Image (spheres, helix red, strand yellow):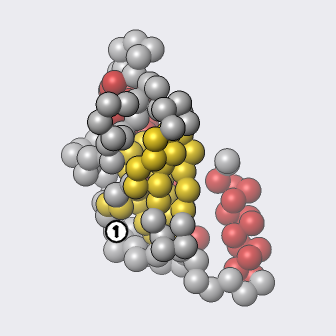
Amino acid sequence: MEFEPLRKQLEEAIAQGLQDLQVHVVAMHPETYRRTYEGPVVDEDVVDSYRTQRDLMKQLRQLVGSDPHSDDQPRIHWYSYVFDHSFDASMALYSDRTVQANQEGHGSRWVLREVQWKNYAQAPMPAGTQPPAGM
């Protein structure tokens, strides 16, 4: 989904009284672009992934009314996962705020670990949640 339509829908909901806005972001760990099966990955792809995720975080910070330059974001929850070429998954968010990945190809499920977002450039970022062994 494009961010602009999402932003517009959320602003409309806020205007109608939405107050407790919690944002849960599930994103592929940028470094896992290096392990694609389609050929060698240039560093530009990894840099672009970091840039895209930083830009998204900045927009989300503005949307929830917090400081767009601060990493202290209790209303924004970040879940990074490890990409695999056989990874064809959907994500589910439950009422207890557990986020689960459902790998469609293998019929497996696993809980994604939340990590705190830091305003990463191309630098070490907490490892993404690995799928269960044997996939």
Task: Where is residue 55? Give x, y as percent.
Answer: 48, 53
**Placement of 77 over or under 107, stated as above or below:** below
Measuring from the top left, give residue 91's x and y in whole percent: 54, 51
In the picture of the structure, the residue carrying the numbered disc 1 is: 71
Q: Residue furthest top?
A: 39
Depth order, front residue of 46/24: 24
Residue 107, image x and y in percent?
Answer: 51, 38
Q: Residue at x 40, y 73 (%)?
A: 73
The residue furthest left is 124
**Picture quadrant where residue 36 is located:** top left
The residue closer to the viewer here, 133 or 9, is: 133
Q: Is residue 19 above or below residue 125?
A: below
Q: Is residue 50 shown to the viewer in this render?
A: no
Residue appearing at x 41%, y 60% in the figure:
78
Vertical placement of residue 80 versus 71, above or below: above
Q: Which image quadrant for residue 30?
A: top left
- The C terminus sits in image quarter: top left
Q: Mark 1: few, some, or many residues within 10 Å (few <14, many ≥20)?
A: some
Residue 101 on image: x %, y % = 48, 48
Q: How many numbered circles are shown?
A: 1
Please give the name of the residue rendered at 33% of the width and 41% of the height, measured from the top-left corner: 132
The answer to whether residue 124 is left or right of residue 116 is left
- The amino acid marked with disc number 1 is Asp
Front-most of 76 and 99? 99
For this view, does 30 lie left or right of residue 123?
right
Instruction: Tell me the SS state at disc 1.
Output: loop
Residue 39 in sight in this render: yes
Question: What residue lies at 40% left-to-right and 55% top-to-bottom?
Answer: 111
